[in-house]
Amino acid sequence: MAIEGLLYTQQHEWAKIEADTATVGITDYAQQMLGEVTFVELPSIGKEVKSKEELGVVESSKAASDVYSPVTGKVTEINTRLESNPELINDDCYNTGWICKLEITDTNSLQALMDARQYDEYLKSVE
């Protein structure tokens, strides 16, 4: 189930927008599909990405899955706790399991994202 106040992609990433910063992670649906997360490849600070470009990789006992940037921006912070505790994504993907923070450099990229209601409707079509 989607969280109000977050924005979502069809690839199951979420973004929490605060001023010109987007905190990014994968959704509860994504972490459930992956199973037990065993490794997270974090982006480099300073990396510039366009919306829908690869940001990192989440590996699990089942598969490896690319994480795509929900917005166009520049990585300003990474969640280094995931390096030693990748299971934080399983435990709390919307809070302690965030992946990185981006400085949004193109606000138009936000228009392609879904709100919580739209994402919940989208999930019904993929399940």
Image: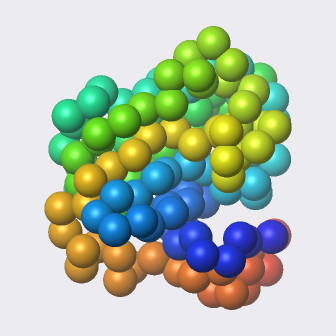
Residue 22 in view of the camera:
yes
Q: Position of residue 76 (x, y in %)?
A: 29, 39
**Residue 49 drawn above or below residue 70:** above
Residue 62 visible: no
Left or right: residue 5 compared with residue 126? left
| Depth check, front residue: 101 or 25 | 101
- The answer to which of 111 and 6 lies nearer the viewer is 6
Residue 100 point in image, percent of width and height: 44, 41
- Above or below for 8 versus 54: below
What color scheme is it? rainbow
Q: Residue at x 79, y 80 (%)?
A: 124
* Depth check, front residue: 110 or 57: 110
Query: Could you say where residue 93 lies in the image, as x and y percent from the top left?
Result: 70, 46
Query: Please, which residue is most extreme toward the top here?
Result: 84
- For the N terminus, the image quarter is bottom right
Image quadrant where residue 120 sits: bottom right
Q: Position of residue 2 (x, y in %)?
A: 73, 71
Residue beneath the point at 48% across and 44% down: 67
- Residue at x 72% of width, y 31% of height: 88
The number of numbered discs placed on residues in the rendered structure image is 0
Rendered position, 85 above or below 4: above
Q: Which residue does the image show at 58% across and 32% down from the upper left? A: 58
- In the rendered structure, the answer to whether residue 10 lies left or right of residue 127 reads left
Is the C terminus in the top left, top right, bottom left or bottom right quadrant?
bottom right
